[in-house]
Structure formats: structure tokens, C-alpha cells
Image (spheres, coloured by chain):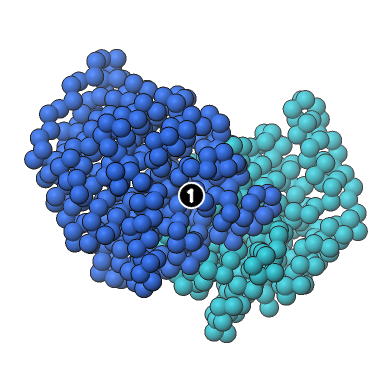
Chain colours: A cyan, B blue
């Protein structure tokens, strides 16, 4: 069985996206939020079968851990109420997908984060999604300001109430930023990768994983720049008198395989322990084209992983068992 | 001959660093800047021979392209006048090193950048360093705000006057940020790498290299996250209707070899054309320790490059000829 730990619902029915625009316009105008539109099951099926599910079938992916479109979370837009209503709407839509295709999708929720708002205020929506909707994890935005990085680092105690809830509910978080407002950054080209590297370095510098032995954090996009600069990070851990990476952060931190060429995947598997790697494709997502050098989709990451010729035990770990260990609610 | 394109003077005489503190304190107090201290040639020799030069000799590096300590540029501190006087002092000190050891060091200058100040105001110091002090290049900070990224992207026309001067003087810039004020970021662990990735994506998105065919830009730290995610960037170029990387930005953009483990260097050389790679170590710099796995310094990057077993033509390119091509004033 092959589980993709990193899929986003980027092909939502148009009515959902239109409502978001109306919601923001209403907030700006100081008016009441319009009613959420009626979206039929057929519209959802249509939005899934021709894209996500078709690609999963073509690529032989059995199940996707599925979350709302990351760039559309846009926690910097509106206020806390806007963010809460938007997160609920996005999560409810994911829930409908998981109900329509229970074998193919497991839900991961967007949080109602908002700049300057305590993360504790996101616990209610996490709990609703996990306990009532059967979700298996959440996407945690380390920078709800949309590129201004106005929050404290993820290792600051202000985040701890949320980690307590994660541990209690036995769900992991994927650390995932959203759209960026600063023109210096391109969302999928630099902001995402920068956030991955930033989060890892924060984990390296502090005692978070010591304080929460049961906490599990997935850093997407192959860990940003980290595996490529693994020697740099090992050396920094040494210089900063932190535990060796393998004995410290890597007990709780996992990388996905969203790296879109063979040499990158080769490096990832050479450098990072197999127990820390979860198959992922970020599909349908950041890069949608076909690589002229291979004739295959850039984000068809299964091909790169298969080309490694892993031993069957290792192959099973990266394609299935690690995901079940990091997201144990997959098996409930 | 082996040329290291990326060395910083991180072991300056204490009087230089003390003066900087006095300068900033005087500025804050609204007082006159104290006189720059007298530093003897012997003090400079002592600061160089026991560290930079000793390590160069131990590692068989013949010449270092040498610039002021990057994290101490701190363009966000003080104002334009403070930054100008500090850049001059740092560059004059580098100049003295290059006069004392003309065979071992070539100078690269710090610029008097300051947030919100036009980059054109840095042309004078660039010109002084190149024309009067014999420097071969400059370090250009894409974010003089120290992590707030308040400047326009490097591809914005506001930067063009400086590029015109670079082309006229026939010198490249290494794109290099400095200290960071935001607690989310660690200077050498995330801010530097993030800036490298950010700059590359900016170059990918715009027509800068088309507008300045003679411009040469070095992205340090092995190109940040870029080579590891080369497929992602190739795919993004395709999605954004930009030229293929090899036909576009890679005509003008170069990466150094500051990647501190063998798998990372292997990937860099597998993915990036040999003509775009310049040997560098970032020494004495970000990571100063010895790797317990190899018994050698993490930043002894020559070992990793030598272990590739390059053909002699390629070896000569990465260790010497590419540096001479990118920094032609080395041969004047």
C-alpha cells in the first residue's frame, strides 16, 4: 500500500473559492459574511476524480493525507473570525472528500490561525476535526503573518498549549506556511523552502522535542535546504552544544519526499534515516508540468523513490509504515 | 593553483570590533564618532597567520577572495553615515591584509548599504575599493534591513544603477546577507540559506540577466536550497514561462562549494554545470568544528571536491579558472 502524506485540495469547486472572495470583501466592507454556498457531492466528485484521484490511480498511490490548499490558508487575511470561518469551511470540504472516498483520503486540517492571536485559540478546531471529522493531523503555519514572521519561533512556550493538544489527540503537524505578501519571496519557489529550513533550525536550537517526547512534526518539501546542508546542520548542532541531530530533533521530526528530481531524492535517502522519511508528492501542487528530460510529471515522486531500489523493508517504511506511525489515527 | 572564492575576515584585531561598538554607541547617544584606532601590521599579521592563513596552508589553498565578516556588516544598524564609515573601515582593513599578503588574498568589499537608502549611494565605495584598493568584487546584501526584507527584489530596476557600475568595473557580486534581527531565524543556519534560495528565485522570475548580459552573481552556500530542489526550479521556470535555467539565469549566476558534507557536494556537481561552480569554504566561518565522522573540519570543502575525482579540466575550472573568469580583476 502506498500512502502519500502530502496532498492539497487545490482543485476545489469554484463556488468555494468565490465564497472566500466574498467573505474577505464583506469583512473589508464591514458587512455580514454571506452564506456558504451549496456544493453538491457531484461537484466534489468532479473536482477530485479528474485530477487528484486520476493522478493517484495513474501513479499507483492508494491513499492521500489530504489538506486544504496551503497557499489559500492566507492566515494574514481578515481577522481571527474570518480565519476561523474559512478554516471551518475548508476543513468541512476536506471532510466531505474523505466521506465520499474513505479509502482514498484521510483528512488533515487547516487551523484558524491569525497574526497575534494565541495558538491556543486553534485547539478547538483541531479537536473538532480530529474528534468529530476523523482527521489524522493538522497543518501548522509557523508564520501566519504571511512572510513577516511576526510570531515567536515554534519552540517558544507560547506554542506549547497547542503541542499539548496534539500529543493528547495523538496527531502530528506538518509545518506549512501559506501565501506570502512580500515581493521578495515566491510562495512555492522560496517562501515554502525557507520556512522548512527555518523551522528545522528552530527545532535544532531549542528543547522542544525534549519537552514533548510524543510530539511529531513533519517538515515538507524534503526538509527544505536541510538534507543538502546536513553537514552544516550537524556542525551547527556541535557548535551550539546541542545534541547530535540523530539523537535530538530527528526523534520527532520527519521529512517528506517532495523533491522533484532523482539526484535530490538520492541525497535525501543517503543522508536521512529511512525511519524519518514519509512518501509525499505535494500533488496537485507546486509544480504541475512534465519534465522534458524524463517525460514524466516533476511531482511524480514515486518514480524517483522506486528508482532507488530500496530493500523491501525500507520501501514499506517510506511508502506506508512511517506514515502509519506518524499519523496513527490512519488506523482508527 | 587553488582559489577559495568565499573567505571572511572573522578574526579581526579586537580594536576593530571595539571601535564598531563605540561607533554605534556614539551614534545612539548623538555624539561624534570616535577616531578609528591605530592597528599595527603585526596585529593584522597575528590575526591572519594563526587562523586564516594557517588553515589555507594546511588545506593547500593558495589564494582567498577575502571580504569583511558578513554577519558584522549589519547594515540595519545605525544610519547611512554609520554604515558608510563602517564599510570603509572594514574595507581598509581588508586592503591592508591584501597588501601584507598579496599572493594569498584578493579583496572583496562590503557596501555602505542602509535600509531605504538607494543602492546608487554604494557605487562610490565600490569604485574606491576596485579602482584605488585593487578589489576584485563586492558583497551585495539583498536585505539590508536584517531580516525584514524591506527592499525591492534584486531584479527591481532600483538596483540597476549598481549593476551598471559592476558591469563597467567588470566585477561580480556575491549575494550575501548579514546578521538577522528576527528571532525566528538563525543567521548561518537559516537566514543565509534562505537568502540564497530567495535570490535565485528572484533571478529566475525576471529579466535581470537579459538586461545585463555582463552581470555576474555568485550565490554562496552552494546555492542555498536550489541544487537539492533543481527539479522544482526547472519545473517552476517551465510553469512561469521562463527560459530553461541553463539557458537563462545560469549564464550569469554561479554557486560556491560551501556545502559541508560529501553527499551535498556530490549532488551539487551532479546537478550544476561545472562552469557555474567556484570552489569556496566560507572559512573561517559558519561552522568551525571537526566532523567526528571524518576527523576533518566540516568546512574543509577541498576534501569533498577532491573526493569527486574530477577530470583534470573540470578540477582546474572549479578550483581556479572559473574564479578567474568570474573575478577577472584577479589577473590584473
Residue B301, quarter of the rendered image = bottom left
Instruction: Chain letter for mark 1, please.
Output: B
Residue at the extreme front: B332
Where does residue A269 sit, x and y in percent of width and height?
A: 50, 72
Q: Residues within 10 Å of mark 1 (few under 14, many from 20)?
A: many
Front in this rendered view, residue B244 or A290: B244
Q: Residue at x 68, y 49 (%)?
A: B240
Residue occupying the point 69% across, 33% down: A78
Q: Is residue A279 above or below residue B162?
A: below
Q: Position of residue B41 (x, y in %)?
A: 10, 38
Give above or below for A244 relative to A140: below
Q: Is residue A250 left or right of residue A24?
A: left
Figure quadrant of the N terminus of chain B: bottom left
The residue carrying mark 1 is B253
Choose top left, top right, bottom left or bottom right for residue A245. bottom left
Tally the marks. 1
Q: Residue at x 14, y 50 (%)?
A: B49
Question: Quadrant location of residue B119?
Answer: top left
Judging from the image, what secondary structure is the residue with disc 1 in?
Answer: strand
Question: Looking at the image, which residue is at 52% across and 48% down?
Answer: B200
Quadrant placement of the C terminus of chain B: top left
Asked if residue A99 lies left or right of residue B156, the reply is right
Foreground residue among A108 and A307: A307
Say whether residue A105 is visible. Answer: yes
Residue A132 appears anywhere in the view: no
Q: Nearer the viewer, residue A9 or B291?
A: B291
- x and y, in percent, of residue B74 in the image: 35, 34
Relative placement, left or right, of B325 versus A276 is: left
Amino acid at each position: 500500500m502506498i500512502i502519500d502524506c502530502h496532498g492539497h485540495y487545490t482543485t476545489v469547486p469554484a463556488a468555494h473559492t468565490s465564497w472566500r472572495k466574498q467573505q474577505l470583501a464583506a469583512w473589508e466592507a464591514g458587512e455580514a459574511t454571506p452564506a456558504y454556498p451549496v456544493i453538491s457531492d457531484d461537484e466534489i466528485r468532479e473536482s477530485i476524480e479528474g485530477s487528484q484521484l486520476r493522478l493517484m490511480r495513474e501513479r499507483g498511490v492508494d491513499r492521500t493525507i489530504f489538506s486544504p490548499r496551503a497557499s489559500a490558508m492566507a492566515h494574514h487575511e481578515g481577522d481571527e473570525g474570518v480565519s476561523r470561518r474559512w478554516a471551518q469551511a475548508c476543513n468541512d470540504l476536506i471532510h466531505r472528500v474523505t466521506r465520499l472516498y474513505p479509502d482514498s483520503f484521510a483528512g488533515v486540517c487547516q487551523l484558524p490561525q491569525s497574526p497575534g492571536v494565541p495558538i491556543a485559540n486553534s485547539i478547538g478546531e483541531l479537536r473538532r476535526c480530529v474528534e468529530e471529522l476523523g482527521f489524522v493531523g493538522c497543518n501548522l503555519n509557523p508564520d501566519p503573518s504571511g512572510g513577516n514572521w511576526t510570531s515567536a519561533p515554534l519552540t517558544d512556550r507560547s506554542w506549547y498549549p497547542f503541542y499539548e493538544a496534539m500529543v493528547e489527540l495523538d496527531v502530528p503537524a506538518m509545518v506549512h506556511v501559506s501565501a506570502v505578501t512580500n515581493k521578495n519571496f515566491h510562495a512555492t519557489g522560496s517562501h515554502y523552502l525557507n520556512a522548512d529550513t527555518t523551522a528545522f533550525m528552530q527545532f535544532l536550537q531549542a528543547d522542544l522535542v525534549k519537552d514533548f517526547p510524543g510530539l511529531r512534526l513533519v517538515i515538507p518539501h524534503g526538509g527544505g535546504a536541510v538534507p543538502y546542508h546536513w553537514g552544516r546542520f550537524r556542525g551547527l548542532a556541535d557548535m551550539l552544544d546541542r545534541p547530535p541531530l540523530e539523537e535530538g530533533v530527528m526523534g520527532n521530526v520527519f521529512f517528506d519526499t517532495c523533491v522533484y528530481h532523482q539526484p535530490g531524492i538520492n541525497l535525501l535517502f543517503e543522508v536521512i534515516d529511512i525511519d524519518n522519511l514519509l512518501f509525499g508528492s505535494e500533488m496537485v501542487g507546486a509544480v504541475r508540468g512534465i519534465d522534458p528530460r524524463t517525460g514524466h510529471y516533476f511531482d511524480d515522486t514515486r518514480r524517483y523513490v522506486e528508482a532507488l531500489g530500496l530493500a523491501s523493508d525500507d520501501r514499506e517504511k517510506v511508502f506506508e509504515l512511517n506514515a502509519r506511525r506518524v499519523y496513527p489515527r490512519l488506523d482508527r
